[in-house]
Image: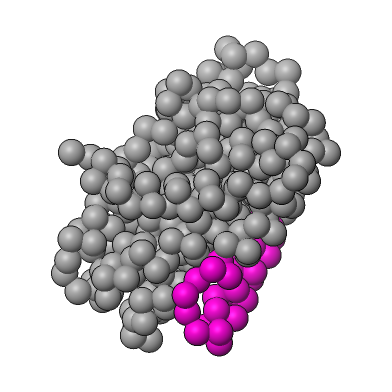
Amino acid sequence: MSVMDRLSSRRAQINKEIEIALAVGENETLRSAMKHYPLAGGKRLRPLFAYLVADAISGSGELTVPFGAGLELIHNFTLVHDDIMDHADMRRGIPSVHKKFDVPTAIMAGDALFALAFEEICKLKVEDVLLRFILNDTAVAVREVAEGQQMDMEFSKRDDVQVNEYLTMVSKKTARLYFAACRIGAIIARGSIEQIRAMGECGQMMGVGFQIWDDVLDLEGDEEKTGKPVGGDIREGKRTLMIVHALSTLKGEEKKDLLSVLGNQKASRRMIQDAMDILHSCGAVSYAKNFALEYIREARERASVLPDSEAKELMLELMDYLVRREE
């Protein structure tokens, strides 16, 4: 049985909370746009990690469900706005929100999801002083996600992005929500200072590994499983770790050919495939895979502060899943 199957009951709790949260508002169009991504699937990785951390520390995973649901709504809010900025037509195998509705409605749906997330987090059954800390930490996380997204957009105009710059960007854009999930999961569970610190680091590490593997899936994933066209990041000119590595090592015609395709919205499938072949042949894909695996290894080391339990084992398996998944 896969780790996702073994987590099905916890996912069901999170999904039910999300469905209840989304049954709000009087405008049917806006409500439908808000539901479009959250109810179309999703693995619920961030809320699952918060749940498992709390379970591993004190068996209190259920207490994290409102926070996890809120974090998932924040994640979906970022996807709605990202797809507008990236001109993405598909997400999870369905039309993106701005394609199914329109851009103004998608912007408002994203804004509403952002607000709804904090309504949901306020349902946490914790002391007021702790709730204020959790709300502040979550707000900081969202701001840093925005900083990371801005860096990502600015990088697409540069050919000299360095690995350390990429890692800073992805640490904000993607890993910050994993950091929040694991750290706040530990806080809700009344973990020790050492556990809270280590879980934040664990989430940060796994978030970076997750994003690097996600970039690899853009080249090697099955479109039917990922719900997105293969090579989309190349067409959008994304400076993924593979691109950063390739541009720093390639010379001559290969580098010129790769640059001619990056960010070229009119590039043919053949051109995209040729660019993908260059990334494989120059070792950029292997380089990225090894990077992701190393980050997950370090994340697993941070989990050593947790007592042995089924929840800890499931958490470790879920970390491995981040860099083994095909969607």
Q: Quadrant of the C terminus?
A: top left
Residue located 24% across and 55% down the image: 314
x and y percentages locating residue 89 in the rendered image: 67, 26
Does any portion of residue 22 appear in the rendered image?
A: yes
Residue located 69% across and 41% down the image: 31
Q: Nearer the viewer, residue 251 or 126?
A: 126
x and y percentages locating residue 14 in the rendered image: 43, 52
Residue 159 placement: quadrant: top right
Whether 146 is among the magenta residues is yes
Whether 117 is among the magenta residues is no
Which residue is outermost to the front? Answer: 26
* Count of numbered marks: 0
Residue located 60% across and 73% down the image: 135
x and y percentages locating residue 259 in the rendered image: 66, 30
Would you place residue 7 above or below residue 303 in this image? Answer: above
**Dominant secondary structure of the magenta stretch?**
helix
Q: Nearer the viewer, residue 143 or 295?
A: 143
Would you place residue 164 above or below residue 127 in this image? Answer: above
x and y percentages locating residue 78 in the rendered image: 64, 49
Q: Nearer the viewer, residue 279 or 82?
A: 82
Colour theme: one colour
- 221 horizontally vs 40: left or right: left
Q: Quadrant of the N terminus?
A: top left
Residue located 60% across and 48% down the image: 22
Q: Nearer the viewer, residue 226 or 94?
A: 94
Does any portion of residue 247 appear in the rendered image?
A: no
Residues shaded magenta: 121-148
